[in-house]
Image (tube, rainbow, N blue to C red):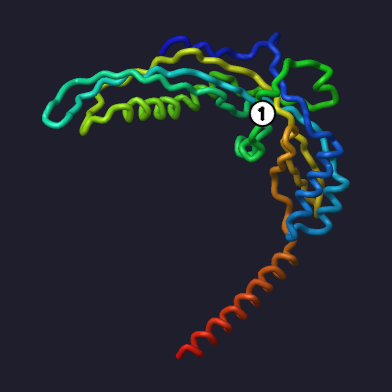
Amino acid sequence: MSDLTVRKLNTTEKPQIIPFAVSAQQASQLFARHISRNKLNPTEFFEAARHGNVKPVYFPAHILGCKILTSLTAECTEQYDSFVARREVESDFSQIVSVAGDKVDPTLFTLLEPYDFEALQEYESSVIRNTEIQRFTVTPEDFFERIRPDLENRSFFSAKNAAGYAEEKITENIFDYKDVTAKYVLLPMWVLTCKYQGQDYRLYMNGQTGKVAGVPPRSRTKMLAFLGAGTAVGAVLGQLIWMAVKALW
């Protein structure tokens, strides 16, 4: 493997950031709309969320990119001929994004995607003023080692499928890494925190697009009423179907 130059973040480096495109007022309105849209949410929770705390947070992420040159050697068969074939196929991986902090679950990040990285700009203190900034706790090296098996697997199959031989047996495969890059970024997120029936609840929002993630509590009364209504409708439909079948006989 060559040119594997993923570096650790040192104290003099500053990540790039995506500025908030959603204002605090807009965030509050979008959270309220998200909660009210589901009729199974408790009415009281809507009121609790309305008085909840909405704060802006920048959470850390890595953007990695690389090229992998896969060299395969295989014993191949085409019709009645057998021979050794060698091939090289280059796979290009760009903008592989991963959460780089320990306060945001990767699943949550997936729910908040996508972010438009064309909006990235240089770190400026004026842009992040009055905003919580979470720390980088995952290094690019750790992230790269975690995803490397998947990258190599995808590169291998791309190279393997590039030929059209009837049969082939891979005898050697080599992965050569090129142009490995790592970029440190801070991504905007609004966090709504509120308390309902003694429990803390949080909803999250993509600070660039307004997309919301998180599940509010469900009203037991409303769920039972909904299930009851569904059972009643099912019974009526069942009776109608039975009467129609009976009429045919």
Is the residue marked by circle 1 packed among few (<14), some (14-19), or many (20+) residues within 10 Å?
A: few
The residue at which mark 1 appears reads as 116
Q: What percent of the width, then of the height, locates residue 5? A: 52, 11
Figure quadrant of residue 191 = top right
Residue 134 horizontal side relative to residue 154, left or right: right
Residue found 20% across the figure and 26% down from its top: 76
Residue 72 horizontal side relative to residue 118, left or right: left
Amino acid type for the residue under numbered disc 1 = Asp
Residue found 26% across the figure and 30% down from its top: 164
Question: Where 33 sits versus 127, above or below?
Answer: below
Total residue callouts = 1
Of helix, strand and loop, which one carries label 1? loop
Foreground residue among 236 and 47: 236
Residue found 81% across the figure and 54% down from its top: 45
- Quadrant where the N terminus is found in the figure: top left
Q: What percent of the width, then of the height, locates residue 47? A: 86, 53
